[in-house]
Image (spheres, rainbow, N blue to C red):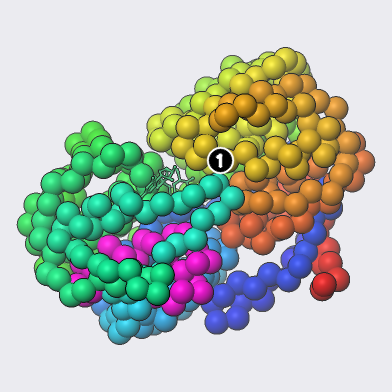
Amino acid sequence: MLKYFHKETELLGTVPNVLAECSFTKKLEGRVKISGSKNASLAMLAATLLTDEECIIKNVPRLDDVFVLLALLEKLGKKISFRGNIVIIRGAVKRQILPEGLSRKLRASVLVMGPILASKGSGVFALPGGCALGERPIDIHIMGLRAFGARYEICGGKMNFKRKILHPAHIHLPFPSVGATENILMAASLIPGKSVISNVAREPEIINLVRFLNAMGSHIKICGSTYEVYGVRNLHGAQFSVMPDRIESGTFLLAAAAIGGAIKIIGAESGHLTVLIKKLAQTGVQIGEKRGILSVKAARCPQPADISTAPYPGFPTDLQPLWAVYMLRAAGKSKITEKVFPARFMYVDELKRLGADMKLKASVLTVGKSCLNGAHLIACDLRAAAAMIIAGLMANGTTRVGGLRHLFRGYENFFEKLQMLKANVSIRQTKKK
Ligand code: EPZ
């Protein structure tokens, strides 16, 4: 079985320069098991800052983003062990200054702000960097923390929050931001009294976080798109298992639809993928479920279908690049509208190197049936990397994909899983420049 080298030094995944080589694959067949959710794991790991007691989190995927966040938590004073897919975290936070280098590596590092300010009252945080999805503001996070009474000054590019005892608040989010909802929820859990947060994000990863916070002794009530949080003075440790990765499940559903064949997906939560499954059925894909196993059979001649991304339960923005690649096989034109990250089309120019018929106007991409031929592509973000590899397996000849560090951030054993499904893919180390 292919094993790419993934040195884990000090919990930091350092991935050497590797290149994916993809050759035309007539169809996928076999079974694939879904890992724990990256995005749910990151929020839960940040939530462990709300208690000094031991937390045991199971089904945590071994990914670079997880390694970076664990390294951050360790720098803050947490004692961590990560064996297999089980993380054990305990101990008090001893430092409240977030190292800039690590914070810049991981957008989700912003999630430590709420827990640190609620438990310690002060902290110094670097402004998170942007990425290929475009500008990544945190104004909604800040608006929520300020509502609790937090105040900061910017010095040296960092936000320096002065010591404050935070108070409960009623907060209405201008946009259902996933990260801001998580940050504000975690802070409210440790602010004694009743806080009400409305127009929240309702992604399954957030419900997973609510369940974990309640297991730690918080009292969060979900009322539609409003959360009522009865914050407490202390939260205790808890044991919890991470939900299956919704986006990885969608990635393999779309890989089968785009490349062809029939596969079985083990451990996916189909209830989290209703919109995608409905759209796939519209194009002719057959999807069945039996005892928690999803069976997917690709359409011989897929029909085009338009999508427009939206916060959950809408079509997930993270699957937008993968849908675009699938539509390269559809018999006709389809329109893809991106409403969450309007700049999330950096992958289009790369796919055009394969001969993709794609035209982008404002945030609407029109895709036509395309005959793809191998080329050398460079991935620009996590989901675009997966999309380029799938496109390479659809293309004639060989396609090489670089920039794989993005992929290792968010997909556990991606190449091994594709190989188990009979995909012609391998990775090799490139000469260091
Ligand atoms: C989370 O990012 C996910 N990351 C993203 O997954 C996912 O694409 C995104 O939610 C949307 O579902 C993690 O959970 C670690 P947002 P997040 O705040 O929290 C704007 C992946 O591939 N916004 O819901 O950063 C923002 O610019 C990653 O796994 C503000 O304007 O997403 C964007 O346009 C990529 N101000 C929109 O809201 C803010 O303060 C959605 O962002 C915050 C966000």
Query: Among all residues in the image, which is located at the extreme left?
Result: 193
Residue span colored magenta: 98-122
Q: Is residue 29 above or below residue 236?
A: above
The question of residue 325 being in magenta is answered with: no
At horizontal 72% and vertical 54% (from top left) the residue drawn is 415
Horizontal side of residue 34 vs 347, given as left or right: left
Q: Which residue lies at the image location 52% right of the left edge and 70% below the top edge? A: 67
Q: Position of residue 299 (x, y in %)?
A: 71, 21
Up-down relation of residue 6 to residue 34 (above or below): below
- Can the viewer see residue 22 in this picture? yes
Disc 1 residue crowd, few under 14, some 14–19, many 20+, Cα 10 Å = some
Looking at the image, which is closer to me, 34 or 410?
410
Kind of residue sitting beneath label 1: Ala
Which residue is denoted by mark 1 in the rendering?
343
- Work out whether residue 64 or residue 79 is closer to the camera in this orientation and state it: 64
> Which residue is at the far right?
397
Secondary structure, magenta segment, majority class: helix
Residue shown at 81%/25% (left/top)? 370
The N terminus lies in quadrant: bottom right
